[in-house]
Amino acid sequence: MPSRCLLASFILAFVLSCLPGNLLTATDFSVVPLLDGERDGELNYWGGPFGTLNMVGMTKQTSVVHSGNAAYQANLGSLPANTLSFFQTFSSERTGTEAQRQTRDLTRYDGFEGYFRNDTNAPLSIRLELKDYRDSNSHRASKTFTIPTGATWNKVSSNFDLGAGWSVVGNPDISRTYIASFVLNETSAVSGSYYLDDFSLIEPGGPVDPQTAPIEDLAERLARRQFEGLWSGRNRTTGLIYNHKDDVGVAAMNTTGGVLWMLPNAVKRGWVSQTEADSVVSQIATSLNTNLNQTSYVPTRFINPVTAAIPGGNNEESSIDSSFIALALHNYKSQPTTSPALAAQIDAVQNRFQLDAFAIASGFRLAYFPATGFTGGTYNGYTNEGKVISLAAEALEAHHVPLESLWNSDTNRTRTSLVNPLDAHLVHSSTLFRAPFEQALLNLFVDTSDRGVDNYPVRSLATNPWQNFLRYEREVAAKLEQLGRDNFFQPDAASGAPFSSYQQYSLYNNFGQPDLFMPWSVAFAMLAGTDGAEDALRALVQIDGVSGPLGLADTVRWNTGQSEPYFVSNSGDNWNTVLSTMALLEYLDRLNGEQSGSEFFAQLAGIKSALNEVFIEGDLNGDGVTNSADLSLWQNGYGIPSIGSPLAGDANGDGYVDGGDFLRWQRGYTGVENLSNTTVVPEPAVIVLLLLSLIGLPCRRLKNS
């Protein structure tokens, strides 16, 4: 009988073959849409608006299209001879402050292609003009294309080498592109409209067929696209990463921390040079010092992108957001390629973070506000945010909080399932806080896959964070299949625009929005190795509007049973892109057998010893020691399907009670480490205990079915 994965592949191929031809236009993943009208709102795929001069208007319409459902109409009205007219589109929110501009890198592309239809009364000479962050006529590059009149679509294309055919003034830096304009200045009067559709950027490396390309190639292409979109958009004065792709007023700790965390991986892959990475990290450290000079305990959650000052408003100091960047700082200073001088600079600013001020008996407090003080609420539910803060506070020296002191403060937890009770997993007690990113979060920073269940005192509610994440994602896949939404990975935390606000959407609570999902979150399912996740990625990137130059869309609305979405959001939360990219990089490293970022961090001496305090190998009953009592629990549960509870003999939380759990018990009993890389030979005393435990043991199926 064929495996479920093989069967899913056949089904996917059949479904894709049956979809309408206009839906699957993105058959080459290296062709990256920028302007095609398939997303909601009046923004391009970078997140930038439009501007016009001397035309009736630039509108998105559905009557005249090259492909898909919509295209752009430039209505010239009656344009006199020798009259300058243009429409232009921006890299992000338009601003008159040069230092604020969130720019995009066109040098990462070989070129572009697009389609024009000229319904005016005369041929048009349309000049594509590119300007960089200076928005200056003294620094620009342009190329002219002649579009004949008539109701046919005409393809235009070019490279970005600014060589033959390009007119260059000054020294435009298109690695920091701010404006792309389509300019007319005809010598004769013109009236009517022309149309633009499928204006796309072409990545180097040749065509990529998302249906047949190796999944590794597809995932790496997407990860690089998302990372470089974030990287090229950083503020060049402070090194900070903006909060949203379509907003230049605010940078954020979480986005900056995520990009900083990924930098060593980007250097390893050749996406960023070591010199450039070190320079930006030094810049970020300086910016954090500037901000910390104006705060009470930790950097503000949001931050002025140009000056690194506090942003104004409530000036929230967030324990979780500051933890993201504290972990990234610790990670970067620990890299073997980081110079002593840079490591010292990083260490100095990291140890200004006063996370200990947020620690109380019930957990880490959510935030501090200068006007009102600390919040009463703490991270006391199973969302992994409290554990991330614990990890960051453990890594501090000046304001150290031992990992074990608040690791188990997330007491608002329950074990439940969506479809299969044998895949029950821990989630927050409230369905308001069960989004997928919360299950993935800790695993993006520290690897616990080679550890057992942690020392949570209520043993029926103890788990291993990695195994719990895998079980959660398996249940997501099962529920999506049950709902007939197999490829719609997956509802997650984001804005539900246009009909609902930001919520922690999940299959446990869709907040009344059953047609909503977040394509960027498919990366978590891929990291978890979930059945159907890779097929879902292949399908999603072929849908008009779902992927673009900054990666996968933030939010999609797609009614079950329909052939295409009816809404694709064009606003973008950079934090979602960061999370997605972190997960993809973890996925790629694990797929290739390379040390991932989380695995590197888990092996740092101080971190490893701290984790040993909360993960006691083989201690099934949670009394702090590994002995024959724990072996008895394993004996009693051997071969019986488990829900991941150590009391059932499941030492690693994977849902099976088998020889692997015995080896974990043995490692704890004998003190042997590196289980995954070692052939463990039982000590004589252990052999005796094992033989005694197996006497009379009934034959049971070892597999959870």
Image: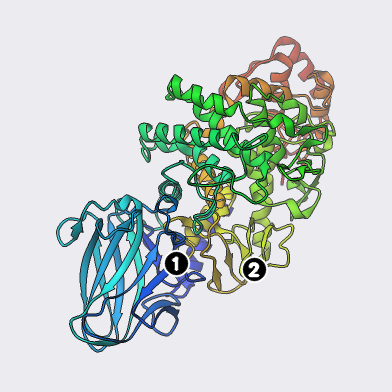
Looking at the picture, how far across and down is residue 391, in whole percent? 66, 31
The amino acid type found where label 2 is placed reads Asp
Q: Relative to the observer, which residue lies in front, 71 or 625? A: 71
The amino acid type found where label 1 is placed reads Pro
* Residue at figure coordinates x 45%, y 50% from the top left: 226
Q: Which residue is mark 1?
A: 49
Q: Relative to the observer, which residue lies in front, 582 or 619? A: 582
Looking at the picture, how far across and down is residue 430, in whole percent? 80, 52
Please count the marks in the image. Answer: 2
Q: Which residue is mark 2?
A: 515
The quarter holding residue 448 reads: top right
Q: Is residue 661 above or below residue 691?
A: below
Disc on the earlier residue, 2 or 1: 1
Q: Relative to the observer, which residue lies in front, 72 or 437? A: 72
Q: Is residue 136 above or below residue 527?
A: below
Looking at the picture, how far across and down is residue 135, in whole percent? 33, 58
* Residue at figure coordinates x 59%, y 51% from the top left: 531
Looking at the picture, how far across and down is residue 437, in whole percent? 64, 48
How packed mark 2 is, by other alpha carbons closer than 10 Å (few <14, some 14-19, many 20 or more), is: some
